[in-house]
Image (cartoon, helix red, strand yellow):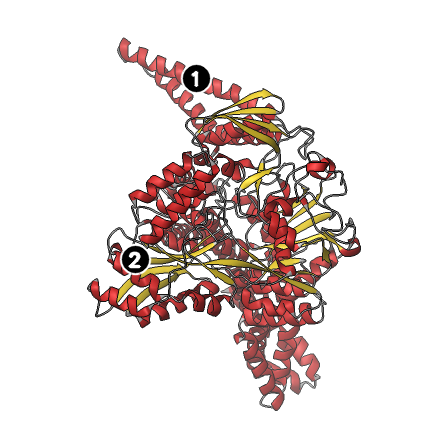
Amino acid sequence: MRQIKSGKSSPLLAMLTVLGLLIFLPMTPVSGQEENKPGWLEWGEKYWPTKPVRGGIFQAAAPYYIGVMNPNHFPVMDWVTISHLYDKLIIHDARYKPTIPWLAESWTYLDDRTMLMKLRKGVRFHDGSEFNAAGLKYQMEWILDKNNGAWSRTWLEPLEAVEVVDPHTVKWHFKRPWGAFLGTMASVPGYMISPKALKADWALSELQRLKRRMGSLKRKAEETREQVEKSSDKDEAEKGRLEQEAREAALTASEAESRLQELEKLAEGAKPLDAYPVGTGPYMLEKNSPGNYVQLTRNPDWWFGKSVGMPEMPYYDGLKVAVIPDPSVRLAGLKAGQLDLAIINPTQYKLVENDPKLKGAIGPLNWLVWLMLNQNGGPCKDIRVRKAISHAIDRKALIMGTQNGLGREASCIFPDSHWTHNPDLQPIAYDPELSKRLLAEAGYAGGLTLRGFTSNEPVSQAFAKAVMAMLEKVGIKWDCKLLGIAAMAEPFTKRDYDMAGGLYQWIFEPDHIATALYMPDGVLNYERNHNEKAMELIRRGREEMNEDRRRAIYQELERVLYENYEDVWLWYPMMVTGANARIEGVNVDMLKAYGEGYVRSHPTWFKDGSR
Amino acid sequence: MKRYIAGRLLYTFVILFLVSILVFILARLLPGDPIQAAAMINMDLANQEIIQDLRIRFGLDRPLYVQYVIWLRDFISGDWGVSLGSGEAVFDMFFKRLPVTLELFAGSVFWSCLIGFPLGILSALRRNTWLDAMVTATAITGVSIPVFWEGIVLIYLFSVVFHWLPAAGFVPFAESPLGNFTSLLMPSFVMGTHGAGLFARYIRSSLLEVLGQDYIRTARAKGLSEKAVLIGHAAKPAMIPVVTVVGLAWGYVVAGSFIVEYMFAIPGLGRMGVDAVFLRDFPVIQATLIMTAVNVLLVNLLVDLIYGCLDPRIRIQ
């Protein structure tokens, strides 16, 4: 639960692009007939007045340790690198809707439990293997296999089977209607991994697991054999039992030995996928120095560039993503010319704006800053208290004071640019007098103390202090502990709080955030609330296949949550970035119009091809 | 001497065993567990069922004493477990990062000696003069200046303003000796200035004590030059307390590198420790702490042995 920043500005959204390029966003679509090509497939002067130039190594920074590069493995900390290495089946449009075909060329629902999906032909993974239906089927089955420890497994729970129709067509079979399917395929499970690499990785894991067990299996075989040898004084029945046990143990050990040999063959020359990722993305792994940096090199066979007749894509010769944990040092690296792009705090924006060698950019983020309320006991069980808290907070002032004005007031969980956002709901009005009245009605005329916590990062601390001051004015004392991420887990899971600060990042598929926040088994719920109406709507949203009806369900969900003052939604942050002014190819209008689709299909380049 | 070393080693093992228990318990006493911590970062981490699966997968569902016994047994046999954060073998992680921290240590000791020795000697030789007062003030500043403040000022000056040095990051020596040198220049200096202040103070007092000894007066009475007295008679005995300080500095490096490596993005043991604490990556936290204890104990042992070399009286005792 960290805080972020945001903005306003111009060539900026641009940067978002680049950022997206570097960050988490997926990719774009492909051709089709020239005359009917979608708007984002525009590379003429309308897009950029000069021709792209190849060359240069793009330098970026990530705040976290780089290591796990299979997006389905735990814990994924490095979306920056992952987005360059892999392509997804489907990507999102500007309203975060999964509508753009990427590695999936097209799809048709045969009925509400079956979908036919055509896959793009001629796509190869970085290891030379072909992207096809069999590989996709293998990946989905790999994710679903509990032994493989994919944290994305439960997202695929409604999936019954994947059927290979032909090398480039699959038929998806669902256990029930699955409205969130496309959104899921535009998310973690939809990053396509080389099946060859995945199989080798699986063999390596199995081998290690079996090697760990071999010692005990052999020991058991040995011990049971010794027991048989010493059993001359035992009766026949006991001897028989021991002999049987020894036979079984010997058989198990011998089978394991054979299995070990098989696995050794399979794993020969294999490398762990987390350290050596293999996707179809625009860049391939060149060098991996865990904890230090990841260096990627241009994929000369990137399918997308070829498919649209622009084989020079992507334009950089490579990317280097260094781990620089401290945000001030990242900014210094940017200003020193060591980095080409850095995410900065809104308060640092001026430092970038005034530097002629840099371009600043501000763009909307699909994130939410909020206060979660524990209604499972305590004062927040009372709607009057929840209402009082919500009306006591001046969102505008909060954004101005802590975000340098860079943020949009939140009305509920889906950001204003999200396709399921309910435009009829206005952010809760600041009305401290109403708050005081409500508190008095609820029996807290003499004051109320709320226990809670938020992240100890500097930006969160500023936000917490501002909220505390606002609540203080209406007689609420927020006893807020500032904790590290891991330390927050304990009070949260034990519901040892009344109100806690939070940040939810990357709101794409509506079911994912709705489930996390408002279903009892959600990772951000832990039975802190129980709104039957909301839960029913979430269940319906999961199964609804029609887009309009689905939107209506989520808008209704927002209304239900809003009217019940379920939580306190504060603002939707902005992404503020600084970038090397030599970066070209960022068309803000197209970015706004096509979102992720644009980002993926319009890689940037250095002016004259060098940093 | 052999008995002495054997005794010290036995003592070291006993301490290590106690440290292992302490480290294991302390790591678990930190609030929050790694799986839920990751869920707080990756909000989409599916649902509580997955969190429980992951907990079982990493053995965090077992009783604490079982976890300890398994961990200790594996640790002694060289299996330090797998990082919950990166999936890498902790043993490999540790030994990949150790040389980076050692380089940083070597660099910081270099700066400490380069600055601290001349200042300390100068201060002792010009006792109670304005020069002595200046050196003392400089040394105290060096010891008390916050590392993060000094670091950020240097980054601003040498990276942002002059563009002479990289703001952060590390280049391995094998990749580029020059890149390696420039990437460690600032971080090692930041760590070295702290040591330099200490060195200067210790050398001053130690040298003053030695210079007041009878045999120094005898040497001077023989007509030896001040330089000969200093180098030939005072320097070696004055080094004894300095060896202690270098030993202590090693302990400081391991602790101080937590901040410096984090700030300058140096992938050494310090940052590995910070990352691990942030994520409650128990196997890494435990390995880092245990090996820190091993380092400190071994360096103490080494320092004791060096005493013997520098001062025969200690050897005989």
Q: Quadrant of residue A303?
A: top right
Q: Which mark is residue A498?
A: 2
**In this rendering, is residue B3 above or below A333?**
above
Kind of residue sitting beneath label 2: Asp
Task: Name the residue furthest left.
Answer: A443
Task: Tell me the element at label 2.
Answer: loop
A436 in relation to A209, above or below: below
Estimate the spatial distance between the alpha carbons at disc 2 and disc 1, rounded to whole Å: 58 Å
> To which residue does mark 1 refer?
A250
Q: Is residue B117 left or right of residue A465?
A: right
Give the letter of the chain under mark 1: A
Image coordinates of residue A1 in percent, x first then y, are: 44, 55
- Which numbered disc, 2 or 1, marks the residue closer to the eye? 2
The front one of B86 and A436 is: A436
Q: Can residue B132 be seen at all in this image of the molecule? A: yes
Residue A368's spot in the image, x, y percent?
45, 54
Which amino acid type is marked by label 1?
A: Ala
Mark found first going from the N terminus, 2 or 1: 1
Quarter of the figure with the C terminus of chain A? bottom right
* Within-10-Å neighbours for mark 2: few <14, some 14–19, many 20+: many
Q: Which mark is residue A304?
A: none
Residue B100 at x, y percent in the picture: 62, 55
Q: In this rendering, would B220 be left or right of A446?
A: right
Q: Residue at x 74, y 47 (%)?
A: A315
